[in-house]
Amino acid sequence: MADPGRIRVLLVDDHQVVRRGLRTFLEVQDDIEVVGEASDGEEGIARAEELRPDVVLMDVKMPGLDGIEALRTLRDLDNPARVLVVTSFTEKRTVVPALRAGASGYVYKDVDPEALARAIRSVHSGHVLLQPDVALALLSQEENGGGQGRGGSLTEREREVLALIADGRSNREIARALVLSEKTVKTHVSNILMKLDLADRTQAALWAVRHGIGA
């Protein structure tokens, strides 16, 4: 029987040695439980639907269905798992599509084990986790993207919500900080994305930083 106090993690990577190393480390964490493994994107989707993990550690480059397509499929299936991409690939053409496909964070395979555990806890808590060069890649794209000149259309409350998004806060944390219901926060987030012509809260956080709002 699963322990409700532990973060349930699914490992999706085509290299067995990588999965074994991740499992060996994560199994000694008191608050993390590895509930399954998959060797490619298609199997990862099936296991995520079957096991309903809290967090999926997903490689990007895999044979068959790759991690980005798996991310898009999980998003379309409305699977609630938060996906943390763990990869050795750092090119912008890999980073940006992965985040836009629904990844909650992006770390590299040489990440310090304790930092990986913190990353899992962070995305599980609803935060968006990006390494500095990943954030710069998105900011670079954002300069040529949507949202320019539209900040003036935001209400004061929406700017407060946007600042907290930029600070990495989840909807629950924003609701607590502003003394609002989570439903109201979700409405504000939707309005922010619509007004700034952005796809998700990752882009919203980076837009906020770029324009001096929040963190």
Image: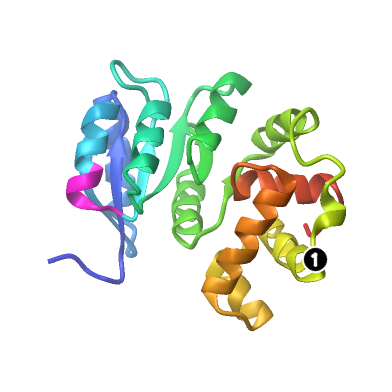
Q: Position of residue 208 (x, y in %)?
A: 77, 51
Q: Position of residue 188 (x, y in %)?
A: 64, 64
Is label 1 in a helix, a strand or a loop?
loop
Q: Position of residue 29 (x, y in %)?
A: 34, 58
Say whether residue 168 is visible: no
Image label count: 1
Q: At 63% from the left edge and 40% from the top edge, which residue is drawn?
A: 131
Residue shown at 28% from the left, 34% from the top = 19
Locate the C terminus and report the quarter of the image it occupies. Answer: bottom right
**In this picture, residue 61 sits left or right of residue 12:** right
**What residue is drawn where x is 82% and y is 44%?**
210
Dot 1 surroundings within 10 Å: few (below 14), some, or many (20 or more)? Answer: few
In the displayed image of the protein, which residue is found farthest to the left?
Answer: 1
| Quarter occupied by the N terminus | bottom left
Residue 147 lies in quadrant: top right
- Where residue 200 sits in the image (x, y, percent)? 59, 46
For residue 151, above or below residue 106: below
Residue extending furthest top?
A: 63
Q: Does residue 116 sit above or below 145 in this rendering? A: below
Judged left or right of residue 63, residue 141 is right
Residue in the image at 48% along x and 41% along y: 103
Render colour scheme: rainbow
Q: Is residue 53 above or below residue 134?
A: below
Q: Give residue 48's quadrant in the image.
A: top left
Q: Is residue 177 above or below residue 187?
A: below
Instruction: Check residue 52 for magenta coloring.
Output: yes
Q: Is residue 95 left or right of residue 163?
A: left
Please state the extent of the stretch shown in magenta in the rendering: 48-53
Q: For residue 86: magenta? A: no
Q: Which residue is mark 1?
A: 155
Identify the amino acid type marked 1.
Thr
